[in-house]
Image (spheres, rainbow, N blue to C red):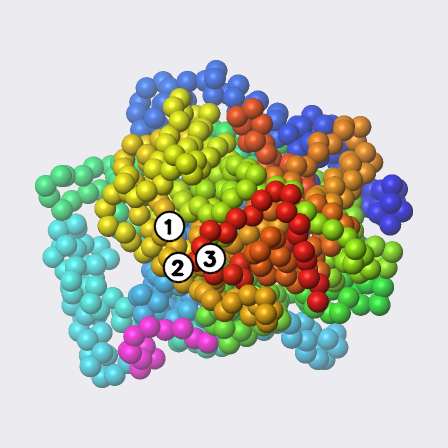
Amino acid sequence: MDGEFDKERFLKEFGGDYGYPNALHNIDQIRANDFKRLNDVVYLDHAGATLYSESQMQGVFKDLSSTLYGNPHSQSSCSVTTSDIVGEVRQQVLSFFNASPREYKCIFTSGATSSLKLVGETFPWSRGSNYVYTMENHNSVLGIREYALRQGAAAIAVDIEDITESDAMSGRKSGIKIVPHTVQRRGETDCGKIDETNMASYEAVEKSSFYHNLNRSSYSQTILNRNLCLTFLPVCNIYKGETYNLFAFPSECNFSGLRFNLDLVNSIKEGSCQIPGTFPTQSGHWMVLIDAAKGSSTCPPDLSKYKADFVVVSFYKLFGYPTGIGALIARNESVKLLKKTYFSGGTVAASIADIDFYQRRDGVEEYFEDGTVSFLSIASLHHGFKVLNTLTMPAISRHTSSLASYVRNALLKLRHENGNCVCILYGINDNESLFDSMGPVISFNLKRPDGSWFGYREVEKLASLSNIQLRTGCFCNPGACAKHLGLSHSDLVSNIEAGHVCWDDHDILNGKPTGAVRVSFGYMSTFEDAMKLLKFIKSSFVPQMTHNITGERPYSATEGVERTSRYFLKSITVYPIKSCAGFSVGSWPLSNTGLLHDREWLLKSFNGEILTQKKVPEMGLISTLVDLKLGLLIVESPHCKEKMQIELSSAQCIGKREVMEIHSQRYEVGGYWNEIDIWFSNAVGRPCTLVRSYAVQNQTLPNREQCIVGMCRDFETRLNFVNEAQFLLLLEESVSDLNSRIRSKLRNDSLNQPAEINPMRFRPNIVVSGGKPYAEDGWKSLKIGESNFKSLGGCNRCHMINMTSTAGTVQRSNEPLATLASYRRLKGKIYFGILLRLCDFIDQDAWISVGQEVMPNTD
């Protein structure tokens, strides 16, 4: 084992906390018995969703297959069984948070987001209310401000800082300071000003019977006075001390892993923590909401000590299954203030269809749980809690924290050969008095030796090739992301204007990361998971001088290439339909779009989405052939009994042509008869339509370069449905070298003989033989027969080259992309093969043929 990541040294430091030494089963037994499906996969996204255990699912199956559960809104025996189990699980949830049922209620929802939405839409907002939330909050918490702002309340994002003052007795005194950002408010009304008219209105309402009837009137009286009372209710609230404010924060930040000091709950509720900028300052009642969705998986809030008004949780974050079920834990006195508008089956004791009348049920849970609760999912929660209770939450917290602490320390020690740090961790330097500890989350970015950033998407892609599953981006936490990455408002606006949105590939903009890499541990994570992560980071992002330097120029043998080397055209392949299989030919005509009919057709869904093998692997099973003599495109699929023959003339096209835009290219296209679309829909297993490009209308390639003077004419480069260029060229010797590297790598890892990678895996149009591996990297231009071509540089490879079609099925693996990533990576891209464009305008017959000499130019 690698001495740097030695388990013996790890156990010497963390052995008392790691692996559940006092439990019935230790961590190695848990992984072997309950998580066989992981195999060699390293799963490190437990903050996103943790994993369910096999014994947990066996318990669920046994329960559901042996117990008859009926709809709880009935009096039958099976309905009573359901009501009983729902009640038991409610108590189990409250016990998990150490919440007394005399103080708290458990309201089941579809998840933490649904619970937050419920609070936001029913909270008693008024023009005097304030919604205050820390910057470190999930988007689902930020969304509550829409309800607050719509009702005229103020919304304020805040930072929490430590203040230390001199004290006559102890010398030092710590405290908490809340620093507000901009006060957000909608509308022009200044809620801070109460003029004489408003005061008179208030006094009139206070003296009227309507005001008193609002509190104790019968149903009919309330209805009669509804309009007037709603008009003056905000004013009444402000002046009668009935303004309600809400403060929201996470128990654990899902971006950085920082666990907030829960003393903040009592500070807010007791009014000892000043909140500048709120209006009116410190007025009304302050209520506290804790987003415990992330923190509860290892350290749930203790509600016997910290009397939060609302706590939200999603159960799949705790034990993986079931999804789509969560809870709102609400204090009895606080939940009574929530004003719900909608009523549904199960929430009313009585209603009349043709009269504006209903009477809600007395139970808080019944009032807020619309319709029939997900009772089978609720029954399944019992088996998840059983797993956690067996291990105990303190032991889970210690176990996961030991792994996180070890990885943090190891990442901080990583250095490039020039001494520069490799890893920037977020949240580790925050004030300890404000935060209890760090959760099992590590958020970071990686740097190159020159100080520039590795993009987080590059890290994610390479990790996936190494069977490491992690998360990248901002994790739906824009405030923490901007705060820790040091992104100003102008940076954020600039990024948005550049097209950056959630889950895209814009990981570096203006020299700054737009997000981070996050790894997070769960109760079933092991030291081996941590070790494999660290080895991956070191091997992929901490290059040694003895190896090819990652981030520099990819490996190339062009230096010292013998001028006497001769190259010949080995094969020609045409791919008529984008992302479908191609066919090889001995010779083929050229056109102004490349090889004649290459990528001239594509499949698109009925909603306009372009179909490719990345999303629809079955496309690789569709074989194609263009018969120039018969004038036919012939296609076959294992999912269709008959071949489909499509005329190359426009006879089968229907309707008028339309314009499509793909990758900033505009195409004039035409569709086909319904029978052709039905055939392709059956072939790929989803509704789709075939369209053909009429490339004469295409636009100029945006990034075209001038050809070498004397070798080609100046004309517009035209494209069919290709991503980047007209041709892709591979050198046969480069493929042989890749295969040699894969064989060597896999022999060291296993006894299995690796399969040979066929050049066709890379979907080249042209394969050339001769010379040394990777000589093509240095080619500036080349000539085949009488035709001239210009190199546009290397081809950036993706996961598509890891898919193969065998016996009518599509299989995925990590090769050859994983091996290419180890030596062919440049600034986050993995290059193999080169892209070409024609430098001649084809105004007469021009063909290329297998066996022709290829004459490259490296100058």
The residue under label 3 is which amino acid type? Ile
* Image quadrant assignment for residue 171: bottom right
261 with respect to 547 (left or right): left
Which tag, 2 or 1, sits closer to the chain's start?
A: 1
364 and 289: which is toward the camera = 289
Give residue 89's position: percent from left, percent from top. Answer: 49, 33
Q: Residues within 10 Å of mark 3 (few under 14, many from 20)?
A: some
Q: Which residues are magenta?
A: 182-193
Provide residue 641's location: percent of width, then percent of height.
Answer: 40, 22
The residue identified by callout 1 is 693
Q: Say whether residue 375 is visible.
A: no
Residue at 35% x, 67% y: name it.
Answer: 149
Q: Nearer the viewer, residue 836 or 393?
A: 836
146 vs 669, nearest the viewer? 669
Does residue 616 appear to the left or right of 524 in the view shown? left
Mark 3 — residue? 842
Residue at image mark 2: 698
Label pair 1/3, CB-CB below 8 angstroms:
no
189 drawn magenta: yes
Q: Quadrant of residue 350?
A: top left
Residue 622 to residue 567: above or below? above
Q: Is residue 508 magenta?
A: no
Q: Residue furthest bottom?
A: 196
Secondary element at image label 3: loop
Residues under numbered marks 2 and 1 in contact, where contact means CB atoms less than 8 Å apart: yes
Q: Quadrant of the N terminus?
A: top right
User: What is the crowding at mark 1: few (fewer than 14 residues within 10 Å), some, or many (at least 20)?
Assistant: many
Please tell me which residue is depicted at 65% across the width and 75% down the height of the picture: 163
Q: Residue at x 76, y 50 (%)?
A: 771
For the point 49% across and 47% down, the residue is 589
- x%, y% of residue 859? 70, 67
Q: Is residue 651 visible?
A: yes
